[in-house]
Image (cartoon, rainbow, N blue to C red):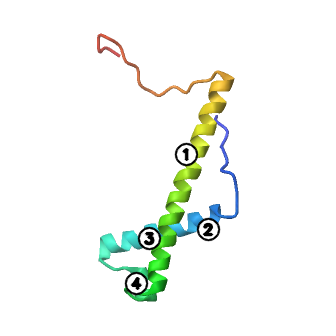
Amino acid sequence: MHKMHKMPMDKLYIPSKLLVVIGAINWGLVGLLNFDLVAAIFGKKSFISRLVYTLVGLAGAYLIVKYKEKYLAMKEHEEIRGKRRYSGKQYSWSGIQ
């Protein structure tokens, strides 16, 4: 069984995850019900609504960077230890697997 690789916990990680979940719920509501929860709470074109949308976008970008760092660190760790993960795919010249 593989050990769980934990994300480095810094002060922005948990708030970023919370904002991304809020954004996902809001987009789900927009897609399913055509209802924008953020706009309903703070006003359609208010400064606070725009701030929430901006923070959700920045949180998403931040998490992408964090996950990329985690992936690269895991890949480097595997190369140092000489381990390669099996991808589940085998290719051959004949096409027979």
In this view, the mark in front (4 or 3):
4
Q: CA distance from mark 3 to mark 1?
A: 24 Å
Q: Which residue is mark 3?
A: 25
Amino acid marked by disc 1: Lys
Amino acid marked by disc 2: Pro
Q: CA distance from mark 4 to mark 3?
A: 13 Å
Q: Which residue is mark 2?
A: 15
Q: CA distance from mark 2 to mark 4?
A: 20 Å
* Helix, strand or loop status at disc 2: helix
Which comes before the other along the chain, label 2 or label 1? 2
Q: Residue at x 29, y 77 (%)?
A: 34
User: Image height check: is 29 above or below 6?
Assistant: below
Which comes before the other along the chain, label 2 or label 4? 2
Q: Which residue is mark 1?
A: 68
Q: Quadrant of residue 70?
A: top right
Crowding near the residue tagged with mark 4, few <14, some 14–19, many ≥20 C-alpha atoms within 10 Å = some
Q: Residue at x 64, y 21 (%)?
A: 82
- Location of the N terminus by quadrant is top right
Q: Which residue is mark 4?
A: 39
Q: Which mark is residue 33?
A: none
Q: In the image, residue 81 lies at what x, y percent?
A: 68, 24
Q: CA distance from mark 2 to mark 3?
A: 15 Å
For the question of whether residue 22 can be seen, the reply is no
Q: How many marks?
A: 4
* Helix, strand or loop status at disc 4: helix
Amino acid marked by disc 3: Ile
Q: CA distance from mark 2 to mark 1?
A: 18 Å
The outermost residue toward the top is 94
Which comes before the other along the chain, label 4 or label 3? 3
